Amino acid sequence: MSDTPPISPKGAPWRNFYGRRKGKGLRASQETYLAEDLAALSPGPVDWEENPDRTPLDLAALFGGREVWLEIGFGGGEHMVHQAARTPEVGIIGAEPYINGVAMLLGKIRSAKLDNVAVHPGDARDLFDVLPAGSISRAFLLYPDPWPKARHHRRRFVTPEHLEPLAHVLAPGAIFRIATDIPDYVRQALEEVPRAGFDWLAEGPEDWRTPWSDWISTRYEQKALREGRTPHYLTFRKR
Ligand SMILES: C[S@@+](CC[C@H](N)C(=O)[O-])C[C@H]1O[C@@H](n2cnc3c(N)ncnc32)[C@H](O)[C@@H]1O
């Protein structure tokens, strides 16, 4: 059997995505943000239809040579906007397939008048294909979908299918942060992330119990806290 994934008619590899792409109806203002702002915030040709050869993105043209960070599954975008506003010397690319979340982010980008962000309204794996090797110096995975049932653990982001291409686009020494409220997700992350070429930087419990100094709590963290679950903050460095 070949290791090559099956090819869809458009030339893209088959990638299962189990999350939601659309929720309840968008507000009129959100439809406007999507129609007016999204195209201009594109990091370049990511989708298979527009870039079947998977030509790498020109990040120097996109961000004028700035350091580049990546947020995977930005949800409503509060953390991405917070980081972009506090580090204007960095360009931040976010990937999120849930279009309602994308619309929320666009509203926040308008209000904050940011010029150092790019938005891929889709699966981070499609972005990994076209990011140049070693081009990203920091990545955030904040409250990834927990997939609590054992038979669904392979759907989690912390699996080789996601971590290996992520490792490829991160520069040596790049920082990879994971926040989660699910103890079994911590277990799987501590097993899988080092296997993909990262060192866990914790020296003691305070390191995973205390938020990063530049942290802003996300919607999912707020929900976890309301429901009595405990956040864990894991910091890895690419070898
Ligand atoms: C539980 S939510 C957390 C959202 C946000 N980070 C927060 O903390 O509020 C997980 C998010 O990851 C997104 N997601 C799932 N798989 C993804 C993928 N392959 N690429 C990018 N985002 C993904 C989902 O659409 C969802 O919005």
Image (cartoon, helix red, strand yellow):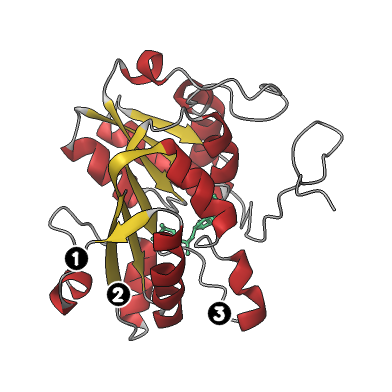
Sequence-wise first label, 1 or 2: 1
Residue 95 makes an appearance in the image: no
Task: State which quadrant residue 8 falls in.
Answer: top right
- For label 3, the crowd category at 10 Å Cα-Cα, with few meaning under 14, some 14 to 19 and many 20 or more, is few
- For label 1, the crowd category at 10 Å Cα-Cα, with few meaning under 14, some 14 to 19 and many 20 or more, is some
Q: Could you say whether the residue bearing mark 3 is in a helix, strand or loop?
A: loop
Which residue in the protein does label 2 denote? 231
Which residue in the protein does label 3 denote? 148
Pointer 1 and pointer 2: residues touching (CB < 8 Å)? yes
Which residue in the protein does label 1 denote? 211
Q: Look at 36% across and 35% down and name the residue there.
A: 136
- In the displayed structure, 191 sits above or below 1; it is below
Residue 165 makes an appearance in the image: yes
Q: Quote the CA–CA distance across marks 1 and 2.
A: 8 Å
Residue 68 coordinates in the image, percent (x, y): 32, 31
Residue 187 coordinates in the image, percent (x, y): 42, 77
Give the residue type that dot 3 points to. Answer: Pro
Residue 227 coordinates in the image, percent (x, y): 37, 84
